[in-house]
Amino acid sequence: MKTKINLLISLFCLAILLPAVAQEKEIPMLDNPMSVQYLKKNLRKSQPRLVFNSTIEKNLKKKMKTDPVLQNMYKAIKLNADEVFEKSLLTRNVVGRRLLGTSREMLWRINMLGFVYRMEKDPKVLQRINDEVMAVCNFKDWNPSHYLDVAEMSMAVAFALDWTAGKLPKSTIQLAKNAIIEKGIKPSWPEGGNHSHWAYGTNNWNQVCNGGMIAASIAIAEVDPELASKTIWRALDGLPHSLVEYGPDGVYPEGSTYWSYGTRFSVVTAAMLESSFGHDFGHFKYPAFVESAVFRKLMNTPSGWYYNFADCGDKRSESGDVALAWFATKTGNKEFFEKDRFLQPVEEMGELSRLAGAGMAWLSQYEEKSEVKMPKAWKGEGSNPVAVFTGGENDPHNYYFGGKGGRGMVNHGNMDGGSFIFELNDVRWVVDPGNQNYHELEQKGFDLWGRCQECERWTLLTKNNYGHSTITINDELHKTEGLVTLSDFKDGSKPEATFDMSATLGDLVSGASRKFIKDSPTSVVIEDKIKKSNKTELITWQLITTADVEIVNGGAILKQDGKKLKLENISHPDLDVSIVSLYPAPLELDRQIEGLKRLEIRIPAWTIEGDKTTIKVRLSGD
């Protein structure tokens, strides 16, 4: 009995210490044999061992003699490395509450310089790496109050040590290893035995910070094997709490930009583990992780923009996606290897990804084994479910539709359940307002990160439902805790996706659903079924666009770039579409998007016969 009581007390204490760990379902775990003994026995002794090792490097150098992708990417990396020499050494420049810009710059510099050094052993490059390492290791700290800063800096210094493989001066090596321990790893172990909030979190902080700590731990493993092993053990134990968020189908809840951020660090973590220990402890086989590459691919629209839901950027970078290339290497799937982007003129690539140097390892390992075509109709469920319809390869209309569920309480989430975007004929007709700069908002004292119903975040047009193409009831905000789920999905030549919107509209309705139908190669139908409650006063159907709009009988004509899209109000042709200008946006702090407007169909509840109504709108082009 006493044993059971002690166990219950232990579990209770763990729940207090690790609130972010709490999950409604059991989480698949990574393999985790880590201990001091395991570390000493299995960690590769020779350097490099972080992403690169002697076997990987030998293959890379051999393949680079004939592989045009590796040759071109190396030219781009050398061009980036040359630019480092034109820059001053880094200083501890904290912007707002973040040193993150400096940490990211350091990781980029070491990736460029470090890879060039691995290939050429140029003393000039080695000297510059030495100067960079000494500069950041003499900072008073790496800003542990915002641990992303520490994680990226720790990885950068770890790479610098590892990729120079003992060729830096002994004094620099000692300085760097001490800095990694004192400024990197130790601050991740708060006093009192608690874990850092990110260690078992569900968002990208988990992936980035645990990945940084794994790199740091491998770099100092011989100096302090106990600290290294317990830190790697914690990382392997905590990482599944972020990886599980990809489930069940690969949707990254924070959107495509944050897929790139979180997943980039997950794949470099997997690569480091594999190069150092011989296997990745289950990253590649983790449920829905590989499927997330399909999600990433499908978030790239024909226009060159992202489907930019959540706090996502608008457009893709000009260079190839090295994180996606890791999946290409592991699967052999050509769809994940952006060869054309890797082969574009190096002068047009600009600044490469700060992990592009590491990415050369898996670019060199890629062998095409299959070409699994991307689906024309796809759905991904989870905490931020998404449905996508496309026209497929060689579609003359470049058709793209993306619709979503979710809720404001999702990491980086918005009140956008039921919203959608639509592209046709190279025009994005229905837009998502996207993200805006965090620092500018924080600098003015704006509470960007609170997600309670009354929190300030929801005053922003980019975050609330008034700035998204969805349904609004009584001109009120969506319920931030109300999850919009994907209740039905049908594939085929005329795919359909239905979302249950009841929870986000709350007691303002008795029930609500939204169905999207691709009824032709150039059109989409939006069909809403709403059941009134005694609180329903006004139903507003919304569409957000930057196109010019002409109101016509039964709908509207949207015009942009010399093309047209017809909005047909099938269910309520007698109700005029109205236009609400959102440029300038309502608040000075809002993102200002030229030409932004909200098209509305407003239906007073008293005009509805009975307790149910259907709103049906069709968008069609030529």
Image (tube, rainbow, N blue to C red):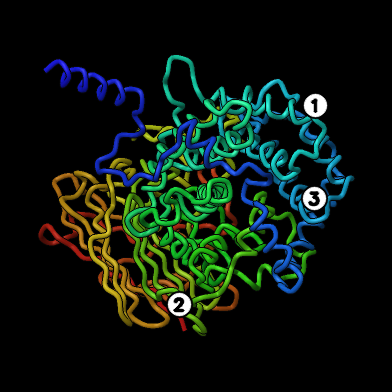
Query: Percent position (x, y) of residue 384?
Result: 36, 52
* Sequence-wise first label, 1 or 3: 3
Q: Secondary structure at mark 3?
A: helix
Q: Secondary structure at mark 1?
A: helix
Of residues 379 and 58, which is closer to you in this image? 58
Real-space Cα distance between discs 3 and 2?
Answer: 38 Å
The reply, left or right, for residue 65 in relation to residue 29 is right
Do tag 1 and tag 3 residues touch (Cβ < 8 Å)? no
Do tag 2 and tag 1 residues touch (Cβ < 8 Å)? no
Name the residue carrying label 1.
171
Q: Quadrant of the N terminus?
A: top left
State whether residue 416 is above or below residue 101.
below
Task: Tell me what residue is drawn at x 27 percent, y 44 percent.
Answer: 482
State whether residue 579 is above or below residue 279.
below
Query: Percent position (x, y) of residue 122?
Result: 87, 50
Query: Would you say residue 374 is visible in this rendering?
Result: yes
Name the residue carrying label 2.
373
Look at label 2 and name its amino acid: Lys
Q: Residues within 10 Å of mark 2 (few under 14, many from 20)?
A: few
Look at label 1 and name its amino acid: Ser
Nearer the viewer's eye, disc 2 or disc 1? 1
Do tag 3 and tag 2 residues touch (Cβ < 8 Å)? no
Real-space Cα distance between discs 1 and 3?
Answer: 20 Å
Q: Residues within 10 Å of mark 3 (few under 14, many from 20)?
A: some
Look at label 3 and name its amino acid: Tyr
Task: Tell me what residue is drawn at x 26 percent, y 54 percent.
Answer: 501
